[in-house]
Image (spheres, grey):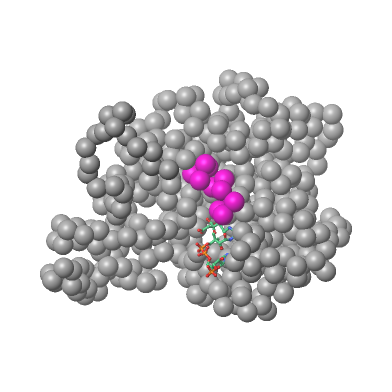
Amino acid sequence: MKSNMTPAGMAKLEVNGKTVELPIMKGVDGPDVIDVRTLYKQAGVFTLDPGFTSTASCESQITFIDGEQGRLLHRGYPIDQLAENSGFLEVAYLLLYGHLPTQSEFTDFDKKITMHTMLHTQIDSFFSGFRRDSHPMAMLAGTVAALSAFYPDAMDIHDAEQRELAIHRMIAKMPTLAARVYKYSIGQPFVEPDNNLSYAENFLRMCFSVPAERYAPNPVLTRAMDRIFILHADHEQNASTSTVRLAGSSGAHPYASISAGVASLWGPSHGGANEAALNMLREIGSADRVGEYVQKAKDPSDSFRLMGFGHRVYKNYDPRAKVMQETANEVLDELNIKDPILDVAKALEKIALEDEYFVERKLYPNVDFYSGVILNAIGFPTTMFTVLFAVARTIGWLSQLNESIEDPAARIGRPRQLYTGAGQRDFVAVRDRVSQS
Ligand code: SDX
């Protein structure tokens, strides 16, 4: 990746009586940055920023989020235009290679991905070690890193060709692995990929077809699945992507770095929120109980939060949530489903968006608020929701990992700290110790 930062003056810092000058750098969009990489050398101090609310970890050219305006761009293209006009595999190409593919570029890419959809048969034996009721994310996390044991021919991340082959393999195999996780959890036989189908169609067939029945894909559900994959593909330096970058900075191969991302995504504050959001909507049960839960969410003494609400970056409506709500309406109409959960979600959104507590804190629905309604309508259990998020986000993780490896400024990530523990002291023999409690 060639750096695109441009100098925008100097920042002056007075530290312990010393004046330190640090370069201010400008990007193409978004806030400027103060480049602090020489701060410790110049002034002998670190910066402290738990949660990285004011810290950029890298320069990136893949995705841009304008939290105030609720804008999300992938290589400059707005998410709503991509969701409306593109397909997931085309967005995957865009994220990875930086431009929308020509027809021949896409045909070639589609063929490359399709040729890697199958898994080594011995991977299937991994599943028999899991209890049937294992959480699908436990099975996914446990098998993603193990993939590396079967594809040792392309593990050198500094060899561009090997790296690209490993990336193509992961994009292609994640849906097959995720479908196996689902089939294993419901005690049905694994279904092999059918390379005549599109990415989303293939995935839905591997999840929902059974040997005893003819399987007829539903184009509305296929389109909805593909759109959900697009909406979850990438999102700047979120927790799981930052985890992937940090893991990859040690030189770990893509399978190890992606499995670290899967683990980080599992948390209910991050990718696990879609499962938690639908469970919350089910617990609320009807629109007339929404007020009670809004009060709980506002109560500082109650740890309850509205799952699918709020975001570290968006202080406006998450543009993905808008598309997700439209898709939820489309799918439920198409399937002629009157899901009371959607009514609960809309009632909750209406009350929350008028309530001072949420307005003051700029808390809006995020990508996870409506996704569960659609995934539930398609037929997935809530425990599979984060697995689906991981299938989609794999391309974002791989694109960001690839960019970090190609970044000439990339070094092993090694944050420092502010130490506030015990000062140096000498060892005390056990006979001389007194109880600390
Ligand atoms: C994803 O980073 C990404 O880009 C992530 C993601 C992606 O695509 O990768 O977008 C995917 O993870 C979306 C977020 C999914 N998580 C949830 O829906 C879980 C519920 N949301 C929250 O836990 C919270 O909003 C976070 C974790 C998303 C953001 O937390 P922050 O930025 O650290 O904000 P905070 O916890 O400091 O909250 C600020 C205030 C607090 O109140 P005060 O202390 O100021 O009184 O807002 C309150 C919080 O209590 N608040 C909420 C709330 N979220 C924040 N109150 C009620 N319900 C909520 N959901």
* Residue 273 visible (yes or no): yes
> Residue 355 lies in magenta, yes or no?
no
Left/right placement of residue 354 relative to residue 414 reads: right
**4 with respect to 396 (left or right):** left
Q: Which residues are magenta?
A: 261-271
Residue drawn at x 16%, y 62% as measured from the top left: 43
Above or below for 146 versus 18: above
Instruction: Answer with the quadrant where ligand 1 appears in the image.
Output: bottom right
Q: Residue at x 75, y 33 (%)?
A: 186
Q: Nearer the viewer, residue 168 or 102?
A: 168
The x and y percentages for residue 189 are 74, 27
Q: Is residue 329 visible?
A: no
Q: Name the residue at 35% across, 49% down.
A: 404
Residue 112: give x, y in percent of width and height. 52, 38
Q: Quadrant of residue 114?
A: top right
- Residue 182 to residue 341: above or below: above
Check if residue 262 falls in the magenta segment: yes
Q: Nearer the viewer, residue 434 or 386?
A: 434
> Percent x, y for residue 97?
43, 51
In front here: 49 or 242? 49
Q: Residue at x 49, y 38 (%)?
A: 259
Instruction: Locate residue 394, reporting x and y percent.
Output: 52, 45
Quarter of the figure with residue 40:
bottom left
The relative height of residue 423 versus residue 182 in the rendered view (above or below) is: below
Give 272 or 14, whichever is nearer the viewer: 14
Quadrant assignment for the C terminus: top left
